[in-house]
Image (cartoon, helix red, strand yellow):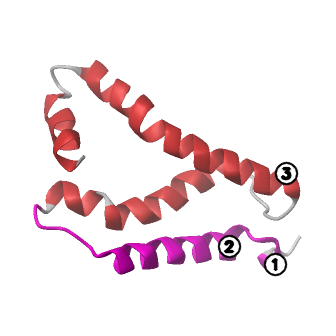
Amino acid sequence: MAALFRIVIAELPRFPELGEAHFERGKMPYFDSVRRYLDTENALGTAKLDDTELAATQFLGMISNYVFWPRMLLMNWSPDDASMAHVVDEAVLMMEARYGLANTTD
């Protein structure tokens, strides 16, 4: 996947539609899935989110900053499964601390 992303990024100036298609078919399904999950948690009253799109962006950003982006820039970046799981677990804890009802003052 990293090689494919690098090709898409390199070809964006000549083929902007390639980037748009990659974004819509590659990133957006994951983003929409997280956003829908957060919408559900919000509706159930288990979380308090004023902006689920922002919260989904924050959550995925915390993970991709460690798992995805270094791979785009560092050819030998290959974190082990335990490190990746730790990053995801910490992102979940951060979301719970920020948006979980046990931590709101309202």
Magenta stretch holds residue 84:
yes
CA separation in Å, label 1 and label 2: 9 Å
Q: Quadrant of residue 86?
A: bottom left
Residue type, mark 2 in image: Glu
At 85% from the left and 75% from the top, the residue drawn is 105
At 89% from the left and 70% from the top, the residue drawn is 106
Count of labels in the image: 3
* Pointer 1 with pointer 2, Cβ within 8 A: yes
* Disc 2, SS: helix
Disc nearer the start of the sequence (3/1): 3
Crowd band around label 1 with a 10 angstrom C-alpha radius: few (<14), some (14–19), many (20+): few
Residue on which the image places disc 1: 102
**Residue 45 pos. (x, y %):** 87, 60
At 81% from the left and 78% from the top, the residue drawn is 102
Main secondary-structure element of the magenta-colored stretch: helix
Residue 45 lies, with reference to residue 89, above or below; the image says: above
Residue 87 lies, with reference to residue 28, above or below; the image says: below
Residue type, mark 1 in image: Ala
Residue on which the image places disc 3: 43
Who is closer to the viewer here, 95 or 36?
36
Residue on which the image places disc 2: 96
At 10% from the left and 61% from the top, the residue drawn is 75
**Residue 46 pos. (x, y %):** 82, 65
CA separation in Å, label 3 and label 2: 16 Å
Residue type, mark 3 in image: Ala
- Magenta segment range? 75-103
Q: Quadrant of residue 76?
A: bottom left
